[in-house]
């Protein structure tokens, strides 16, 4: 459709830089004549709305064959000094391939958008990078007829988001029946850890149904294929987020396999991946507990909490649950100090900076006895931690720990576990960071944090961990 300049001028009346915007749109229309332009209401994350110019059409992509990928770009009223908001616009027989540059709603994330700077950045330049990235990783795939039926509800939801009609607080209406007390969980990610979690949950008979969301491209591979071949009972494998609907627990095991060069780049890649996952699983299971096993677990639990808008009690990380169980086992069975093991925990962050602690203290007759008891306990704890250092965290070990946590949540056991939870207010920590602390777990996640014995050394280590994690989080782009 030819660009009607006079019509655009009237429509762009409230745009701050109307002439610059029109010149850019003329270039787009000339290069991509299939795009059509219109004014519609867009709803932002904070609920505010604006009438914005947007244009829809297809971009040509070569990925073996040639494809026309439907997209929609929303132009902000501060354009060209602010980047547009970009979405895929799939048809009912197309599925969204969640990846590095596309989330489950079809929103498009590109380096070009993040680094947008006028006059260097232009709409035609953006579309060219969009095509280049889509040729590396195709953002859509063809659905079977049964999958297409399930996809239609998600597409309706996406359309409402992009046209300002959705209520993000509304209850999930996925067209599936209410499963009531049916204990269903979803494991996101079909790597070694995801499959280990599925097998551990199945072996312990923790849930009535387990959905494994395989977000990898192409047909089933490796362990996923083996699960299908040997038909593990009550396990469903799917690439469709709607299959996770009404899960009571969602376990996140995915990690980005990109070519990031620095530790910060690796974490940012995981954040980009979670941007496409958390909104989708949160939409389909709005009362679920999110259990994060992705690395680094403290940071990714924080990211999940922010992206989901769930209450802090319903977002936890696997934390030091495995280390705590091993620590108590070593104290009881190897060092023969069962009395100490009863109230012993490993807390803090995963890795070298974890620290032993206790949730109660035996009252000594006098200060001398108290000091002697503390020194004796510290020696035993150091020996146990040395033994613990030699124990790696294999996928199957973490899978068993995840099954243990899921069991406590689904069965509302009110059992104490050392899990990553929002630590603000504990140990004089003032920042929003997740650290492993002993918590009572139930069907709603963290019911209560168990009070730790006061120990200045432990507090110092916890504050140090909180500071380094908070500094890292400040560098991430959520």
Image (cartoon, grey):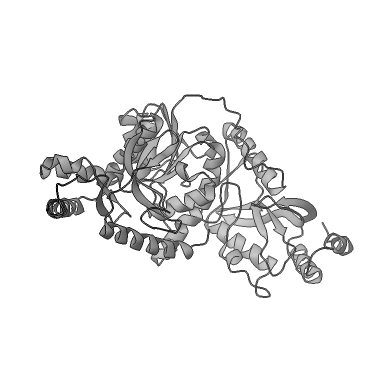
The residue located at (30%, 60%) in the rendering is 461
Image quadrant assignment for residue 340 = top left
* Viewer-closest of 26 and 313: 313
Residue 97 horizontal side relative to residue 190, left or right: right
The residue located at (34%, 63%) in the rendering is 464
Identity of the residue furthest to the bottom in this view: 119
The N terminus: image quadrant: bottom right
Image quadrant assignment for residue 472 = bottom left
Query: How far from the left and from the top, in percent, is residue 36?
Result: 78, 55
The residue located at (46%, 60%) in the rendering is 268
Query: How far from the left and from the top, in percent, is residue 90?
Result: 65, 46
**Numbered-mark total:** 0
Query: How far from the left and from the top, in percent, is residue 451?
Result: 33, 46
Is residue 44 in sight in this rendering? Answer: yes
Image quadrant assignment for residue 170 = top right
Query: How far from the left and from the top, in percent, is residue 313?
Result: 45, 42
* Viewer-closest of 277 and 4: 277
Is residue 35 in sight in this rendering? Answer: no
* Viewer-closest of 410 and 40: 410
């Amino acid at each position: 459709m030819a660009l009607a300049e006079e019509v655009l001028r009237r429509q762009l009346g409230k745009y701050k830089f109307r002439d610059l915007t029109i010149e850019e749109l003329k270039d787009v229309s000339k290069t991509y004549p299939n795009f059509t332009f219109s004014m519609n209401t867009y709803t932002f994350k904070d609920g505010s709305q604006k009438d914005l110019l947007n244009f829809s059409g297809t971009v040509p992509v070569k990925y073996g064959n040639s494809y026309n990928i439907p997209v929609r770009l929303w132009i902000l009223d501060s354009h060209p000094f602010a980047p547009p908001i970009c979405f895929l616009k799939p048809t009912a027989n197309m599925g969204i391939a969640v990846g590095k540059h596309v989330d489950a709603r079809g929103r498009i994330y590109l380096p070009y958008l993040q680094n947008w700077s006028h006059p260097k950045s232009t709409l035609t330049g953006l579309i060219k990078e969009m095509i280049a990235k889509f040729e590396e990783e195709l953002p859509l795939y063809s659905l079977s007829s049964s999958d297409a039926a399930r996809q239609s509800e998600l597409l309706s939801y996406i359309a409402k988001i992009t046209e300002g009609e959705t209520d993000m607080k509304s209850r999930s209406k996925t067209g599936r029946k209410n499963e009531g007390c049916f204990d269903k969980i979803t494991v996101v990610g079909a790597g070694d850890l995801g499959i280990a979690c599925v097998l551990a949950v199945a072996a312990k008979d923790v849930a009535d149904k387990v959905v494994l969301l395989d977000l990898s491209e192409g047909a089933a591979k490796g362990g996923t294929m083996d699960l299908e071949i040997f038909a593990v009972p009550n396990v469903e494998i799917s690439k469709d987020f709607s299959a996770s609907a009404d899960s009571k627990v969602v376990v996140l095991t995915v990690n980005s396999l990109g070519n990031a060069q620095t530790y910060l780049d690796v974490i940012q890649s995981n954040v980009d991946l979670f941007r496409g996952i958390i909104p989708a699983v949160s939409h389909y299971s709005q009362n679920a507990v999110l259990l994060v096993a992705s690395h680094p677990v403290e940071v990714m639990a924080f990211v999940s909490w922010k992206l989901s808008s769930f209450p802090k009690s319903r977002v936890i990380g696997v934390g030091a649950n495995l280390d705590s169980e091993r620590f108590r086992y070593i104290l009881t069975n190897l060092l023969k100090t069962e009395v100490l093991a009863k109230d012993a925990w490993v807390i803090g962050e995963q890795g070298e900076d974890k620290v032993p602690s206790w949730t109660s203290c035996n009252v000594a007759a006098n200060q001398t006895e108290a000091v002697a008891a503390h020194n004796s306990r510290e020696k035993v704890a150091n020996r146990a931690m040395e033994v613990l250092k030699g124990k790696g965290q294999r996928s199957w070990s973490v899978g068993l720990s995840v099954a243990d946590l899921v069991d406590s949540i689904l069965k509302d056991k009110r059992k104490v576990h050392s899990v990553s939870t929002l630590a603000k207010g504990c140990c004089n920590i003032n920042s929003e960071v997740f650290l492993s602390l002993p918590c009572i777990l139930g069907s709603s996640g963290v019911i209560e944090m168990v009070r730790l014995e006061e120990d200045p050394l432990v507090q110092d280590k916890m504050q140090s961990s909180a500071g380094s994690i908070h500094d890292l989080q400040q560098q991430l782009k959520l």
